[in-house]
Image (spheres, helix red, strand yellow):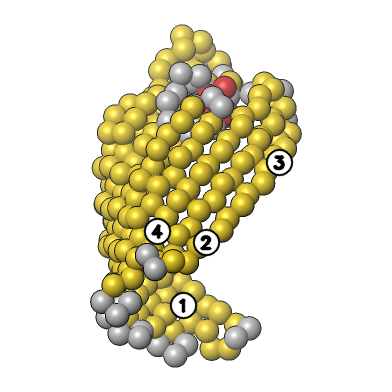
Amino acid sequence: SFYRNLHITNKVGAELNSTYKSKFGVTGFGIDMSKVFIVSNNLGNYNRFMTTVFVEQQIKLLDEKLDITPGFAVNYFSDFKFHFFPGIDIGYQLTDKIRTYANVGKTYRIPTYTDLNYFSPTSVGNPDLDPAFTDALDFGYLKRWNKLTFNTSLYVNRTTDSFQFVRKATGVEINDVEVIQSSPINLATEYRAGFEFTLNYSPYKWWKLNSN
């Protein structure tokens, strides 16, 4: 047997962003609103309204070599309510072509409709899933040459209520083989650390090569 999943998703939205310069630096702010509609023969028919409001303030010190940008965002989801996410970026321009930076902030993952409502003989959604929240710390280094840019960073993340799929026996057999069903749950706190880099080369304005 086989399952056929048909989904139609539509999204409508609008956003407004602006900046304001003063003796305190550059203030950025904005709002983003959208609504998503989904019609599915498997997931069902749902809609989700989302709003994000953000404010950030860039401050430059030490002859504008040091920039500090604290800020925050407030997110609203019609099915997951309000969440507050502060953060701060710090950068230092060592030379015209060398820059170091660090940032600390919070981010999140909202369950998708597939995570919440999907159903098949081997996989089932979990309507009781909560969002997963991540505390993120990142350190980076950027070096520029005439046509070459090198960027590397080290990151450490801590995620609470991370999504993990658990498997369980259903007691149902197909062709003498028991069906195992998987489902997502908010299982535990997860820690991740890593290192990444990107290398961009532009021999001409119309030709760019990159690797990571």
Dot 2 or dot 1: first in sequence order is: 2
Q: Using a 10 Å C-alpha cutoff, classify the residue at mark 2 as few (fewer than 14 neighbours), some (14 to 19) or many (20 or more).
A: few
Q: Is residue 64 above or below residue 23?
A: below
* Residue 145 in view in this figure: yes
- Name the residue beneath numbered marker 3: 12
Identify the disc placed on residue 19: 2
Q: Is 179 rendered above or below residue 74?
A: above
- Element type where label 1 sits in the image: strand
Instruction: State the separation of the CA atoms marked 3 and 1.
Output: 35 Å
* Numbered badge on residue 200: 1
Picture coordinates of residue 172, whole percent (x, y): 51, 10
Three-letter amino acid code of the residue under disc 3 = Val
- 90 left or right, relative to 121: left
Which residue, given by chain and number where applicable, does mark 4 sit on? 57
Marks 3, 1: nearer the viewer: 3
N-terminal label among 4 and 2: 2
| Location of residue 144 (image quadrant) | bottom left
Q: Amino acid at mark 4?
A: Gln
